[in-house]
Image: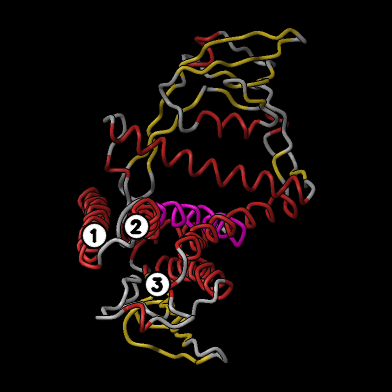
Amino acid sequence: MEFLNYVHLPFGYLLPFIAALTIIVFIHELGHFMVARWCGVAVEVFSIGFGREIFGWNDKHGTRWKVCWLPFGGYVKFEGDANPTSLPQASPEPELTRTAGNFHGKPVWKRAAVVAAGPIANFILSILIFASVFAFVGVPANEPRVGEVQAGSAAEKAGIKSGDLIAAIDGKKIETFSDIIKSVSFRGGELLNVTIDRNGTPISLQIVAGIVEESDGFGGTSKRGLLGISPPQDTVASPLRRISIPDAISQGAGETWRIVAITFKYLGKLVRGQESSKQIGGPVSIAKMAGDAASSGVLRFAIFIAFLSTSVGLINLFPIPMLDGGHLVYYAIETVSGKPLGKQAQEWGFRVGLSLVAMLMAFGFWNDLTRVFAMIVGG
C-alpha cells in the first residue's frame, strides 16, 4: 500500500522539512537583524523556533541568540517591542521612554527598511542558489528543436512538424528546450503566439496550450500546460553548459521572478475560479516535497530551498497584519497621516491577520488530510 511509504515520515520527510525551513527562517530573520543593526536598532532576541529555549547565548551587543523547541518559524525582537510580532510596548509617555536603540522611535523609512529586509533576504537566497547551480553545475544546452510531435496534441493541430525550431513564445526568445517547458507549463488552455524556424523560414503560429493532469504523488493532482512535443532522442541527455557568474546571477534573478509571477498567476486564476483550491498544500505536503527533494540529492534539495525561500519571502509581503507586508501598510499609513496608527488599531489588525493566517494554514492542512485519507482508502 502506497501509504506505507509515509511510515518513515519523521526521518524521510520531517527532518528535511525542518532543515529547509530552518535555513530559510534564519536567512529571513538575519535580513531583519542586519538592517536593524545598520539602522541603530537594538536587537534583544534572535530566535529560531518558538516556545521553550533549547540552547542559546548572548553576543557582545546583548542580543540573545537561541534555538527553541518548536522549529516552525522564528523571530527577531527589537528594543521597544511588546512581543515577537513587533507591536509597540504600552507606555503613558512613550517619547520619554524611547532610547536611541528603540525600534519604534526610529524614522518610518528605517523601520520600513528593517521590515522589508526579511523578505528581500529570502529573495537574495533564492537568487544565489539558482545562480550557483547555473554557474557551477550548468544550464541545459539542448536547442529548442522539435523531435516528435504527439498525435492529437496542440502542436500537431497548429501545424508544428518534427525538425522545427521553436524560436519564440509570445515574443520571448527561446534558447533551450527547457525554455519551452517553462513558458508553457503554467499556461494550459491559453492562446500562445509561437514563432518557429522551419528550414530558415520564420513562421508565426497561434497555439492553445493543452492541459494534462498529473499526480502530485500525495493523493492529489496538478495541472500542467503542454504543446505535445519532445526533443530529438539524441539531445534528451544533452550535457549542461556552465555560464558566467554575472549571467548566472541574472538568470537566477529571472528564475526567482518567474516563481513570483507564477504564484500571482495561480492566485488570479483561483479568484476567477479557473484553478482548484485543492492544489493548496499545508505543512504535510511541503514536508513531503522536502523529503522527495532530499532523497534525490543535494542539488535538487538546494533548488527546493530556493523555491520555498521565494514563496516565504513573497507571502511575507502580503498586506496582512502580523506579516511583514502588514507592517509596511502601517508605515505607509503613518507616512500619509503623519502619525503612527493607534496601538489599539494595530492590535485589532494583528488579531485579524492572525485569524487569516490561521485559516489559510488550517485549509492547507485540511487538504493534506484529505489527500492522506484518499491514499488510505485507495490502498
For the point 39% across and 70% down, the residue is: 73
Left or right for 324, reference 132: left
Disc 1, SS: helix
Judge whether residue 375 can be spotted in this image.
no
- Name the mark on residue 43: none
Q: Position of residue 177 (x, y in %)?
A: 65, 31
For the point 77% across and 10% down, the residue is: 200
For the point 58% across and 16% down, the residue is: 194
Q: Nearer the viewer, mark 2 or mark 1?
A: 2
Amino acid at dot 1: Gly
Amino acid at dot 2: Tyr
Amino acid at dot 3: His
User: Which residue was labeled with disc 2?
Assistant: 330
User: Which residue was labeled with disc 1?
Assistant: 349
- Whether residue 295 is in magenta: the answer is no
Q: Which residues make up the magenta segment?
A: 297-317
Is the Cβ of the residue at disc 2 closer than 8 Å to that at disc 1?
yes
Q: Which residue is nearer to you in this view: 155 or 136?
A: 136
